[in-house]
Image (tube, rainbow, N blue to C red):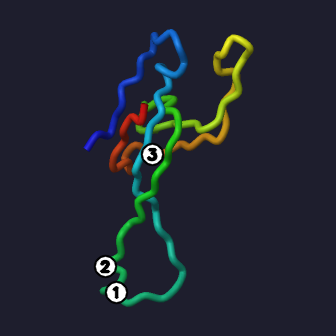
Amino acid sequence: MNKKISIKKKAKHWKDKYPLVEIKWYDICSDSSWHSIPALQTAKLPICVTKGHLLSQSKGITRVFGDYSETEKGDIEEVGNSTIIPSSVIKEIKKLI
């Protein structure tokens, strides 16, 4: 399982610097309803999927963004729809393009 993607820090175009990725990660699950002990012992963590441009993976944190605005030259001006995931809960990360 791949848990890290290399980023070309000196890439000329931002699409090479921030690759489009798909991240599968384990989410924390909380439930306030009543369960038997055996049911709770067999409960599974949900696997979530996030797709976006990989900004960084460092110090135990993976950062992605889904939206961006461009300058007239085609560079990224601002990013939006960001997700920050603890790297320790990542099951798999893969480059889409």
Mark closest to the chain's N terminus, 1 or 3:
1
Crowd rating for badge 2 (residues with CA inside 10 Å; few <14, some 14–19, many 20+) = few
- Dot 1 alpha-carbon crowd within 10 angstroms: few under 14, some 14 to 19, many 20 or more: few
Q: Residue visible at 36% across and 39% down?
A: 94
Indicate whether 70 appears above or below 87. Answer: above
Q: Is residue 73 left or right of residue 17?
A: right
Foreground: 95 or 46?
A: 95
Quadrant hosting residue 97: top left
Give the quadrant of residue 96: top left
Q: Which residue is mark 1?
A: 37
Secondary structure under the numbered disc 2 in the rendered image: helix
Q: Which mark is residue 86?
A: 3
* Amino acid type, residue under disc 1 in the picture: Ile
- Circles 1 and 3, Cβ within 8 Å, touching? The answer is no
Counting from the top left corner in percent of width and height, residue 23 is at 42, 45
Residue lying farthest front?
A: 97
Q: Is residue 1 above or below residue 31?
A: above
User: Could you say which disc has been placed on residue 41 in the image?
Assistant: 2
